[in-house]
Amino acid sequence: MINKHSENLLNTQLENAPSEGYTFSWFDWFCLWYPPGWLILFNRHWQHYQTDPDGWNWPEYGLFLIPGGFYLALLSRWLRLGFRLPRKEVGEFDPKYQQAFREEVLGPIVKYYFRGELQQVENLPPTGPLIVAMNHAGMCFPWDFLTLGYLLSKAREWKVQPVASPILFEHPWVIWWLPPKWSQVLGGVRAELDDFETAIAAPTANAQGKILLYAPEGIRGPLKGWKKRYQLEKFDVSFIKLSDRYQTPILPVVCIGSESLHPWTVNFPKLQRLVKLPFLPFSPLMLVLILFPSMGIWAMRTRLRYFIQPLEEVGLKTHSSKGRVAIYQQAQELREKLQTKITLMVNK
């Protein structure tokens, strides 16, 4: 009943959506090159397609751009909403909105800012389903994932869904920064076994099959910080189990450049746990972030290069008779392959 109500509400929003797409204006280009403006760009695009009465407004956007102004904007919005959190609307994956966001916002960011590129494209299979497993670093908003999703969708017209830490969906900072359910509407899947399994098992209407982006290091990837940026942490084994259960091959990808999204970082676990964040990076950039909290979704300009590795037919092997040891060994072998490739790339 709830799912039916969500579907009807989503269809109503799509019917009422503007017929014309979102076009980058001079103000949007300004937001792209002025770090505190990225949050404005994301919310403006959402408000172009969705009804968002609880969202940020123009006076509050203006406050984002001045030192300390975000705190005044937050107070203004909180008072305007009657001392409550923004309402949570429909949170179902919307491929149409994902495509619009990809083409109209992610496209310019990936092309002109992160300069993302796929290497060894010949290793890309023609279709899914797939679990795309990638090393993860950067200690910032997951731009390495979003960029790879964009590049894969351009190369194969896939609808790619990233798997992300649950805290990135529900933490109060994220709820105030971005529209409620923004991540889910764009295709995000909570990194919990039940949600991950549901996503990979769900039927798909397109011929390409389900494409999920997954970080085998989990949250340990960003947590390793700048000092260990090229060192892969222990792999979780859930993706191996699900690959086997649902006969889904694994496509390994090596990302070089994500470590520079937020350079020179150190994580303080005790403080991170105090504020209930998956990681809390400290670097010289944090001084600027205190003055401009809207920069929380921003990252340093870098060149993101993705090296597509040969397909791992892990899901076609039978692990049920081998038990947990065999599954762990399979994950460890994949980790060693990717570590060798990373080492070779950074030492060139």
Image (tube, grey):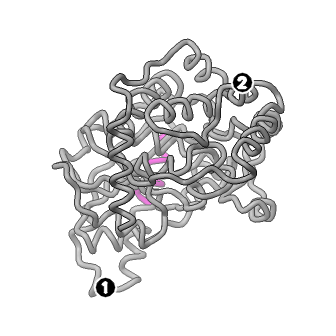
Q: Where does residue 123 sit, x and y in percent of width and height?
A: 25, 44
Say few, some or many: other residues with alpha carbon within 10 Å of mark 1 (under 14 / 14 to 19 / 20 or more). Answer: few
Identify which residue is drawn at 76% across, 60% down.
Answer: 275
Left or right placement of residue 99 versus residue 69 in this view: left
Circle 2: residue type = Gly
Is residue 204 visible to us here?
yes
Q: Where does residue 92 sit, x and y in percent of width and height?
A: 40, 54
What stretch of residues is rendered in magenta?
Answer: 336-346
Identify which residue is drawn at 49% across, 35% down.
Answer: 46
Q: Secondary structure at mark 2?
A: helix
Is residue 118 visible to us here?
no
Q: Where does residue 189 sit, x and y in percent of width and height?
A: 44, 58
Seen as rendered, the residue at the extreme top is 26
The kind of secondary structure the magenta stretch mainly shows is helix
Left or right placement of residue 299 versus residue 332 in this view: right
Identify which residue is drawn at 42% across, 76% down.
Answer: 328
Q: Nearer the viewer, mark 1 or mark 2?
A: 2
Q: Secondary structure at mark 1?
A: loop
Circle 1: residue type = Lys
Q: Which mark is residue 62?
A: 2
Residue 71 occupies quadrant: top right
> Magenta includes 342?
yes
Residue under circle 1? 322
Seen as rendered, the residue at the extreme left is 207
Q: Where does residue 60 sit, x and y in percent of width and height?
A: 71, 30
Q: CA distance from mark 1 to mark 2?
A: 60 Å
Which tag, 1 or 2, sits closer to the chain's start? Answer: 2
Say few, some or many: other residues with alpha carbon within 10 Å of mark 2 (under 14 / 14 to 19 / 20 or more). Answer: some
- The quadrant in which the N terminus is found is bottom left
